[in-house]
Image: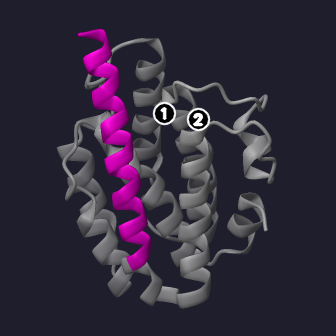
Amino acid sequence: MSLVELIAQADERGLAASGLACLDRCVPLLGGDDLVLRPLWASLADGSDWSVGLQKARGALGAGEETGAPAGEAAGEAEALARRMLDAAPESQEAAGIRLWADACSVASLQIHRLLDPAEDAAPSVDTRREGGTDGMSPLVAAELRRQVTVLELLAEHGPAGLRRALDVSTEGRRVLRAVVSRRARGRG
């Protein structure tokens, strides 16, 4: 099943987890630590309102501000995409807003990985990847696509019990992106 189909079939919790996982993996671009989004994950787990945790995360990550963390044109564009994911996060997890946000986060996260991957991705856009096209996919984009699919499948199969594993998948992806950002910074230094 393609990523687009999985997003279309996901319930509100699955959509919120999908969008949050994409944002969580991109936190290194915003200069955030590994725990900055944990209150949002906790809200998903217990079904509580995440608006307070979202406001705290925005404050900690300087929502609406440029951090200047990674340098270079591609890295600057990647940071801007991550910032938009954070800024666009809905205050509630209601279906319409959360579905749009999860879909936009999916696209943005794949684009971020595409921008930062030193290998070329042969697809004309990330939409090809989201619809199931995998020919000539760059390694970083392929890994991000797998993570997005895995998060949605975990939530579809296990409901709230899948959140812990989804967080683990996101943590792994965050470490990978942090290493990529660090490598790019050392390459310029």
* Residue 18, disc: none
**Residue depicted at 52% across the width and 88% down the height:** 159
Please tell me whether residue 183 belongs to the stretch shown in magenta.
yes
Could you say where residue 24 lies in the image, as x and y percent from the top left? Answer: 37, 54
Can the viewer see residue 41?
yes
Residues at marks 1 and 2, CA–CA distance in whole angstroms: 8 Å
Q: Pinpoint residue 112: horizontal percent, then vertical percent.
A: 51, 34
What colour scheme does the image use? one colour
Q: Residues within 10 Å of mark 1 (few under 14, many from 20)?
A: many
Residue 55 in the magenta stretch? The answer is no
Q: Tell me whether circle 1 and circle 2 mark residues in contact (CB < 8 Å).
A: yes
Q: Which residue is mark 2?
A: 111
Q: Residue at x 37, y 33 (%)?
A: 180
In magenta, the rendered stretch is 165-189
Towards the viewer: 101 or 51: 101
Question: Where is mark 1, residue-wise?
Answer: 81
Q: Amino acid at mark 1?
A: Leu
What amino acid type is highlighted by mark number 2?
Answer: Gln
Q: Quadrant of the C terminus?
A: top left
Q: Quadrant of residue 43?
A: bottom left
Does 16 sit above or below residue 109?
Answer: below
* Closer mark to the observer between disc 1 and disc 2: 2
Residue 81 in the image: x percent, y percent? 48, 33
* For residue 72, above or below residue 122: above
Q: Is residue 10 above or below residue 103?
A: below
Residue 62's image quarter? top left
Q: Give me the residue at 57% from left, 68% from top.
A: 150
Q: Is residue 64 left or right of residue 147?
A: left
Secondary structure mostly seen in magenta is helix
Left or right: where 140 falls relative to 124: left
Which type of secondary structure does the marked residue at label 2 adopt? helix
